[in-house]
Image (spheres, rainbow, N blue to C red):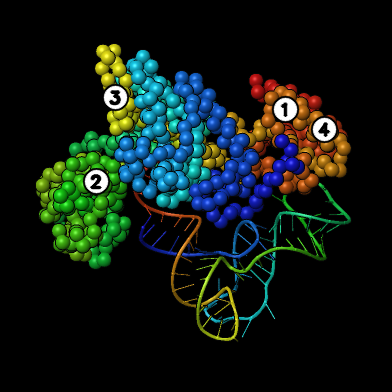
Amino acid sequence: MRLSRLPLNTFKEIPAEAEVVSHQLMLRAGLLRRLASGLFTWMPLGLRVLRKVEQVVREEMDRAGAFELLMPAVQPAELWQESGRWEIYGDLLLRMQDRHQRDFCFGPTHEEVITDIARRELKSYKQLPVNYYQIQTKFRDEIRPRFGVMRAREFVMKDAYSFHLDQASLEDTYAAMADAYARIFTRLGLRFRAVDADSGEIGGARSQEFHVLAESGEDAIAYCDADHFAANVELAPAMPPTEPRPDASAPLKAVDTPGVHSIEDVARFLKVKAQQCLKTLVVLGRDDQLLALVLRGDHELNTLKAEQLPEVQKPLTLASPEQVMAAVGCAPGSIGPKDLAIAVIVDHSAAAAADMVCGANTADQHFTGFNWGRDAAEPRVADLRDIVAGDPSPAGGGPVNIARGIEVGHIFQLGDKYSRSLQAAVLDQNGKEVAMTMGCYGIGVSRIVAAAIEQNNDDDGIIWPEPMCPFHVIIVSLNPKKSESVTEATDRLYEDLQAVGLEVLVDDRDARPGVKFADADLLGIPHRVTIGERGLKSDQVEYRERRSGKETTLALDAVTAFFRDRQG
RNA sequence: CGGGGCAUGGCGCAGUCUGGUAGCGCAUCUGCUUUGGGAGCAGAGGGUCGGCGGUUCGAAUCCGUCUGCCCCGACCA
């Protein structure tokens, strides 16, 4: 492709609307343009990247034995009513009517449609298992689209759905998909991690997320390299301390703490560490009874874990200050477990600590030297907190680390949720009708592009992993208008490199060298060959690798061989 | 949906408080010079100042209202 023909607009300045680096760079490099909130046009160079990702995904899905099909983006309401999700899905579902006032939606996902296909096409256990997939545009009317294509409303997703006679068969395909996903992200040249995950709204037994590791990631992942443990922090169990609780050594003492409420304030005021404090959170329980959850001051409440408790109302809701005042007689900032009028559940770590600081259930007072068993009954304990770096791995391999990641894939064992509601059944060996068991497997194709940039960029721009670069090589032609020899050498190299299978972008624009170098860096093309009159005098050109910035001089005649050897 | 912010040529912004004939940088076009890391000079084009209403002799500026967008929280590929 010749840049002199491609209307490419790059920006020096960062567009005000872009918060994260991938969004900024995609706009600056002219890969992406915004149409409306959460809606984007993939410009020619951006689309090339998207297509490459699609192709890797497609090849690995095919290799794993899945069959590609393409379902409609627009879906009739009847199917969604049948599954019960027409009501449940809420405003995330973009609804519309046709000219006959019949209800439709723009598909945010395709369980209903694929299950409809399955119940029509699959009649016998002999046809199972089968795994269908598509690469297609979804629409989810997100409350707050952001980060460009990372969380767009319209986005490209690979979604696969497998159908099975039994759980064992599902587990085989699930494992094959986990394997295929690992191959996909490896092939794309991304640093990633597969983690145990919450199955969320979709429901079902097992689920794993695939995260591209990046500082800017929205999710926190706990992992331990020694034992291969990896889980979303949402889900990672925090192990109870193995050390027994130290004996009480300090007397219980009430101290005045005027205007001191948050753990941070309390710790500073009393000159103790946050981990010497108890944090008491009051939440709504079942039957609207209030319930106190107690954590160590340096720990965070884990919503999912709290919601697992039978006493806790789901979704987890913090009690209002008024409710707290009415139930225990003081404001939320002064609550502690001693003589508390409501039920108390304590995190393992908080229960294993002695001589703690906690609220005194009286305005502007805290206790120091609080001890379980002495100052309050031995509490009911549970795992209530987020795992933190340094906690022991649940798999026993040593301390965990915390990394940040961008979720780009998610695989689920669905079970029979949809096959039951939509009555997708086959006849088994005994001629008996059984609901099929399902799995579903998603990859955010367009999100991968943004995630790759988040993981691979520097001050000068994007650094594409080679498997997803829009072009392998950019030839920067210096002052082609002025120099016949430069133009000739450029054209010849352009042909030669393409002939050995490379995708080549030629910067033959009538622009100054600095502009071309800056754009080449911004675009993130992995390899750059600079042809200028100066070097040509001795038949030499310059090669520069984008990622390392390393430059070498090559003989013009040797460039093609250089790349051919590199390709191996 | 709750909280905060913004809306002025394609992009980034000033001007708004204190009403008085819309400006800067980048980009674009022309010419000359320049040409190995985002050139210089000279000139040019391009804006109903988000929409609607109001106040005023006069509104980008004040008031009201609507819309769009961005950021922070609960969901997700």
Q: CA distance from mark 4 to mark 1?
A: 14 Å
Q: Amino acid at mark 4?
A: Ala
Residue A350 visible in the shown view: no
For the point 80% across and 26% down, the residue is: A557
Which quadrant is the N terminus of chain A positioned in? top right
| CA separation in Å, label 1 and label 2 | 60 Å
- The residue closer to the viewer here, A284 or A103, is A103
Measure the C-alpha gap from mark 3 to mark 2: 30 Å
Look at mark 4 in the image and give the residue it sits on.
Answer: A489
The mark nearer the N terminus, 3 or 4, is: 3
Residue wearing tag 3: A435
The CA span between labels 1 and 3 is 53 Å
Residue labelled with disc 1: A498
Q: Is residue A226 above or below residue A403?
A: above
Residue at 53% in and 52% down: A36
For label 2, the crowd category at 10 Å Cα-Cα, with few meaning under 14, some 14 to 19 and many 20 or more, is some
Residue at disc 3, secondary structure: strand
